[in-house]
Image (cartoon, helix red, strand yellow):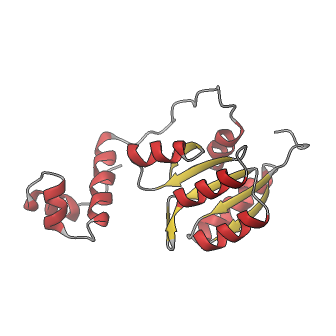
Amino acid sequence: MDTSEDMSLLIVDDDKPFQQRLARAMEKRGFATETADGLKDAAAKIAVNPPAFAIVDMRLEDGNGLDVIQQIHEKRPDSRAIILTGYGNIATAVTAVKLGAIDYLAKPADPDDIAAALARKPEDKASPPENPMSADRVRWEHIQRVYELCDRNVSETARRLNMHRRTLQRILAKRAPR
């Protein structure tokens, strides 16, 4: 990356150990990092100094990462932001891109992949992932996400997934597939 350009990077994640590891890794790659633990902290930092780059977790304890993306894009339209999430789905990926995100990566993301996504020119396509999630893992992640959104209510989750409640209970009792 060209060091003459603004390399300010805001990392917004409520998982403090992950946030700090990622900040150190990105500093080694030439970024001037600043961290925020949540939506309010990020909003205050964006108001003072909107970053050139941002890495934002989708689910924050005090809000949604999409709100952070929107705030950054309003203050600095040329900012390049990506969303990191453990709960990926197509609807939120589309929303993130519409709000100004340039990429949407699943956790745990490799710092090299994150730096490559931030540096990629808009006209360049992302390369396919080296280790994509298996179809079983994607299904399991989706079921877990709907289960969490239904406040861990098995009957409601089963209804929304059009699945028998006992089948869902068996799936939830198993460990995550690889």
Could you tell me which residue is drawn at 33 percent across and 48 percent down? 137
Depth order, front residue of 86/153: 153
Residue 108 visible at all:
no
- Percent x, y for residue 30? 82, 50
Residue 142 visible at all:
yes
- Percent x, y for residue 63? 50, 68
- Percent x, y for residue 41? 65, 73
Could you tell me which residue is drawn at 56 percent across and 69 percent down? 15
Q: How many labels does the image show?
A: 0
| 149 relative position to 92: left or right | left
As drawn, which residue projects farthest toward the right? 4
Could you tell me which residue is drawn at 19 percent across and 58 percent down? 171
Q: In which quarter of the image is residue 57?
A: bottom right
Quarter placement of the N terminus: top right
Q: In this view, does 130 lie above or below 150?
A: above
- Percent x, y for residue 93? 46, 45
Depth order, front residue of 98/178: 98
Q: In this view, does 35 lie above or below 127?
A: below
Q: Quadrant of residue 42?
A: bottom right
| 38 relative position to 76: left or right | left
